[in-house]
Amino acid sequence: METIAAISTPLGAGAIGIVRLSGEQSLRIALRFFHCSGVEREEDVTPNVLRLGSFVGGNIREKCMMVYFRAPKSYTGEDIVEFQLHGGAYLVERVLEALIGAGAKMAAPGEFTRRAFLNGKVTLDEAEGVAQLINAESEAELREAYSLMSGRFHARIDELISELTKVLSTLEASLDYPEEMEEETDDAIRRAEVVREKMQALLSSFRTGKLIKNGITVAIVGKTNVGKSSLLNSVLGYSRAIVTDVHGTTRDVIEQSMVHKGVKINFQDTAGLRTTRDLVENIGIERSLQAARGADIVLYVMESNRDLDETEYSEIRGFSKRIILVNNKIDVYGNASSGVNVSAKTGEGVEVLLDEIVRAALGEKRAADSLTEERHADCLRRALKSLEEALSSCGSAASECVLVDFRESINALYEIGGGNATESIINDVFSRFCVGK
Ligand SMILES: Nc1nc2c(ncn2[C@@H]2O[C@H](COP(=O)(O)OP(=O)(O)OP(=O)(O)O)[C@@H](O)[C@H]2O)c(=O)[nH]1
Ligand SMILES: [Mg+2]
């Protein structure tokens, strides 16, 4: 494979900029530019040791560090050389240019990790964990990314594969000796049923997994002037939305994300609900309802001394499975008997409300290792479908037909790790990476 090169740190002024090479020619190309006492030939370079020297070429002379990782003990499984330079877009670009001029090829997005996958260093789901880690915006997401990247999630899939493989081989044997193996066959089918339950449990964690990865979307809705925008500002800790005592101040959806106790929450402040002739405001209200429909959680805000508008409340509850009643302005009107009591003005109760949002969305117990990737969910759904077909047509005896379904189920599970993933699936996974990773 060709030797590739890329800038692996973000472009811009920074303390350090890293340019990386991977492939057979890495060291040869690197040594055309790197000079350091005691290093004349490739044999002089000790792997895994950082060396101070200078990069001379491409119109620059730069003091820098170089480290060499010898195949297969490297990130990609190939020879890797990394230059640690002074950060600075101009400088690192000249270094990259020099390496390209000497025969390296510009790396495509995710090409280093792709090579790691092709060389068996990581499975496809572990590689997806790397991308998730880089893009993580909250602690909960980071935990899920680690679970993927470290192979902990993969181990769960491997366990399902190995269980099903054992079931399959028992059933294969029982085709030839159906009578002698009646007991073993029954036992194998019971074990397959356990696998089915595990698959179902994993699939049901996808809802939580997605919320952790994308954040919980929360729409703040209610009548005008009840303090929706004030509540948004209060949870964010700064003045994001305009607040006035004029009814109908907010006319558009205002979105802003924050992290509460390690979980990302995407808030949407909306136009207050009321009957009005104002064309612009009516469009805003339509958007408020749309936001309520699309949200994971709706906060229905009212002033704490008011009676609930049952008609409006039940209309909105119809949009969303999860709705939290929020009584605002308790600093002047006092607590209400049901719902969460808050004062957007003083901040009282806001922390409790945030806890309640996370609890309502993710549940009490949040186990790590949930399903976060659509691709994995798709593979699991197919695996489950085939397994269910196998089990429903299995009865008490195995047949060639049933075995086909078991094999399909196993194959779909293998796809998660990239075992038999097609080129286009692999391309799709790595296209979401940044260049240099
Ligand atoms: N005392 C008190 N006043 C509040 C509280 N929250 C909001 N207000 C006041 O209520 C008025 C309306 O607040 P907004 O946050 O603009 O209300 P809104 O629901 O966004 O209103 P629209 O955008 O018109 O739908 C402002 O004068 C706020 O200062 C609160 O907790 N206590
Ligand atoms: Mg408002």
Image (cartoon, grey):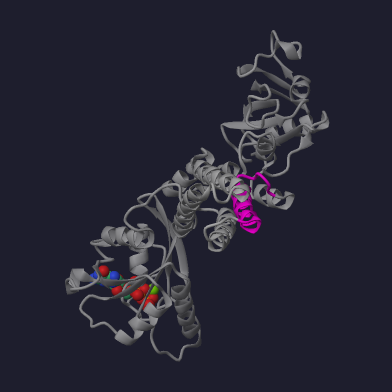
Vertically, is 358 above or below 243? Answer: above
Q: Nearer the viewer, residue 351 or 170?
A: 170
Residue lying farthest bottom?
277
Q: Quadrant of the C terminus?
A: top right
x then y, percent, for residue 77: 67, 29
Q: Nearer the viewer, residue 203 or 273?
A: 203
Residue lying farthest front?
179
Vertically, is 185 above or below 59? Answer: below
* Numbered range of the magenta stretch: 399-421
Q: Nearer the viewer, residue 174 or 197?
A: 174
Q: Residue at x 31, y 76 (%)?
A: 226
Vertically, is 55 above or below 251? Answer: above
x then y, percent, for residue 325: 29, 72
User: Most prominent secondary structure in the magenta stretch?
Assistant: helix
Q: Is residue 32 visible?
A: yes
Where does ligand 1 appear, by image quarter? bottom left
In the rendered image, which quarter is residue 89 located in? top right
x then y, percent, for residue 356: 30, 61
Q: Is residue 244 visible?
A: no
Q: Residue 144: within the magenta? A: no
Residue lying farthest top?
38
Q: Residue at x 73, y 49 (%)?
A: 423
